[in-house]
């Protein structure tokens, strides 16, 4: 753990077991959290939160007297609690997973779950999760920027992609990269996509954001391609973009403009974002595929009707959701999901990608399942164009 660094300045521990509270308190003290309070059940915790509504993080047990963790989470949802939550429990994995799902449906930010018995290390790794991606703006809180800021950022080209490599498990070589949007704001610093993409969708600016990312990404591909002619670059398409009938023509003209082959471009689509009862996204994705763009089903295993989606859309790649990848080692259900997703994808002739691979164990496990590509911090975090060039194409001089 990165001792001495913490994204939270105030923490509430909710657990009826004094030993658990003491262990958690010690773990938070060690990383220098200023304010740590404890509550023995949900009721006490709600009382505390009434006078301290800006508590940044709550570590919450599920099985407690008076008001249990599930009721407590429901109340937090009603209060629109905007901080993050860690669930700690001695219950079995299926119950903890249900609690996590329920909390997400209440709109709560769940940082992760920890199984009892608790120790300091487990708490540190929970707090560490996503720290590397920490930034001035936290998803789920009010954005702190306006529509005009976003328009200005687009005009000023402050929204740019960073690139995360996808590596072949067969030979350890670079297969391609995924472009992930970042907004560099003059006052707020780096704003993650989870904060501004939903805002762009809401403000009707998602086509412009997507256009900016695609243009930069194809520009990068045009520079890297001469050094790696089979390289593929992926961009993310939100469901809203898939209602724009002009998308295929737009993508084709951008490819022409940048002189790149559409077959080198992978469009990642998150199934749950596709509007359910409309034929338009099917037409748009089919036309893109007819024009040789590759289509990837992102976050496979989350959302619903996964298998239906695979039947409706001409996908060429399946990305196993990082939640399953991360949990597969400890949780038999997640392990079965990864295995079943891999079998299904392979049977359908799709290229398989495991996303969010952070450790050597996770990497070895994915290799043992014959997953084709690995993406995750184990190999590299997303990198700006220059750093990616340096890391994968040695000297900048090689790239025009
Ligand atoms: P995604 O498409 O599932 O992208 C993967 C996310 O996981 C990225 O977060 C990436 O930085 C992160 N990640 C990759 N490997 C690891 C790992 O080993 N550990 C951990 N903890 N995280 C890892 P990011 O960049 O914050 O993007 C979040 C989401 O925002 C993306 O999820 C995607 O759905 C959306 N997004 C990003 N760029 C765009 C864009 O240009 N357009 C649209 N519509 N959505 C975008
Ligand atoms: Ca993606
Ligand atoms: Ca994903």
Image: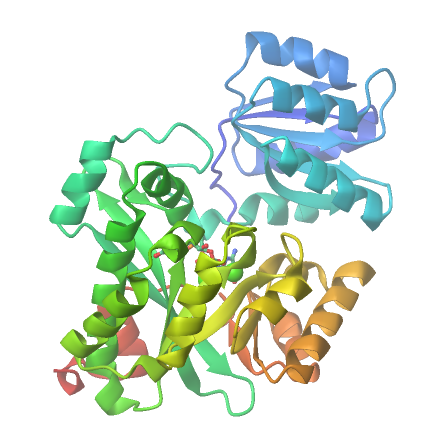
Q: Residue at point 11% right, 48% down?
A: 156
User: Could you say which is closer to the camera, residue 259 or residue 387?
Assistant: 259
Left-right relation of 143 to 154: right
Q: As rendered, which of 299 and 288 lies closer to the eye?
A: 288
Q: Nearer the viewer, residue 110 or 231?
A: 231
Identified at 37% across, 45% down, the residue is 197
| Lateral position of residue 288 relative to residue 334, left or right | left
On the image, the x and y values in percent for residue 44 come to 73, 12
Kindly identify the residue that appears in the image at 45 percent across and 76 percent down: 166
Position of residue 106 in the picture relative to residue 297 (left or right):
right
Q: Is residue 82 visible?
A: yes
User: Where residue 142 appears, x then y in whole percent?
Assistant: 39, 27
Q: Give the residue displayed 29% in from the left and 56% down from the top.
A: 210
Location of residue 255 in the rendering, given as x and y in whole percent from the top left corner: 23, 76
Picture quadrant of residue 37: top right
Residue 61 vs 298, above or below: the answer is above
Above-or-below relation of 116 to 334: above
Q: How many marks?
A: 0
Kindly tell me whether residue 119 is visible in this rendering.
no
**Residue at the front extreme of this rendering:** 279
Where the C terminus falls, by quadrant? bottom left
Looking at the picture, does residue 202 appear above or below residue 316? Answer: above
Q: Quadrant of residue 388?
A: bottom left
Pick the front one: 400 or 289: 289
Where does the image place residue 145, in percent across and percent down from the top left? 27, 31
Instruction: Decide if residue 3 is on the left or right side of residue 287.
Output: right
């Amino acid at each position: 753990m990165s001792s001495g660094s913490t994204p939270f300045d105030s923490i509430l521990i909710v657990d009826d077991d004094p030993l658990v509270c003491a262990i958690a308190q010690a773990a938070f003290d060690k990383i220098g959290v200023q304010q740590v309070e404890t509550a023995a059940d949900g009721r006490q915790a709600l009382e505390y939160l009434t006078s301290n509504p800006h508590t940044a993080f709550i570590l919450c047990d599920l099985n407690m007297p008076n008001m249990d963790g599930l009721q407590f989470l429901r109340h937090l949802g009603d209060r629109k609690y905007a901080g993050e939550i860690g669930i700690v429990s001695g219950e079995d994995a299926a119950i903890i997973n249900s609690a996590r799902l329920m909390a997400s449906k209440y709109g709560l930010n769940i940082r992760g779950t920890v199984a009892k018995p608790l120790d300091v290390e487990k708490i540190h790794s929970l707090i560490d999760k996503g720290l590397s991606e920490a930034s001035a703006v936290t998803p789920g809180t009010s954005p702190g920027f306006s529509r005009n800021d976003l328009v200005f950022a687009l005009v000023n080209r402050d929204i740019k992609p960073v690139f995360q490599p996808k590596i072949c498990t067969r030979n350890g070589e670079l297969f391609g990269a995924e472009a992930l949007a970042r907004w560099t704001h003059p006052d707020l610093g780096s704003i993650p996509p989870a904060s501004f993409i939903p805002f762009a969708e809401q403000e009707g600016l998602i086509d412009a954001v997507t256009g900016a990312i695609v243009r930069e990404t194809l520009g990068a591909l045009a520079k890297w391609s001469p050094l790696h002619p089979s390289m593929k670059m992926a961009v993310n398409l939100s469901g809203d973009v898939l209602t724009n009938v002009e998308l295929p023509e737009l993508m084709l003209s951008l490819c022409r403009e940048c002189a790149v082959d559409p077959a080198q471009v992978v469009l990642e689509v998150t199934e749950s974002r596709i509007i359910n009862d409309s034929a338009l996204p099917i037409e748009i994705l089919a036309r893109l595929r007819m024009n040789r763009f590759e289509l990837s089903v992102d976050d496979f295993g989350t959302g619903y009707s996964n298998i239906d989606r695979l039947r409706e859309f001409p996908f060429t790649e399946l990305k196993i959701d990082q939640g399953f990848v991360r949990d597969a080692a400890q949780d038999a259900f997640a392990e079965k999901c990864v295995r079943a997703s891999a079998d299904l994808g392979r049977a359908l002739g799709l290229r398989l990608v495991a996303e969010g691979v952070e450790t050597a164990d996770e990497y070895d496990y994915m290799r043992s399942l014959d997953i084709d590509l690995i993406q995750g911090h184990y190999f590299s975090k997303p990198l700006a164009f220059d750093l990616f060039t340096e890391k994968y194409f040695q000297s900048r001089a090689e790239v025009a």
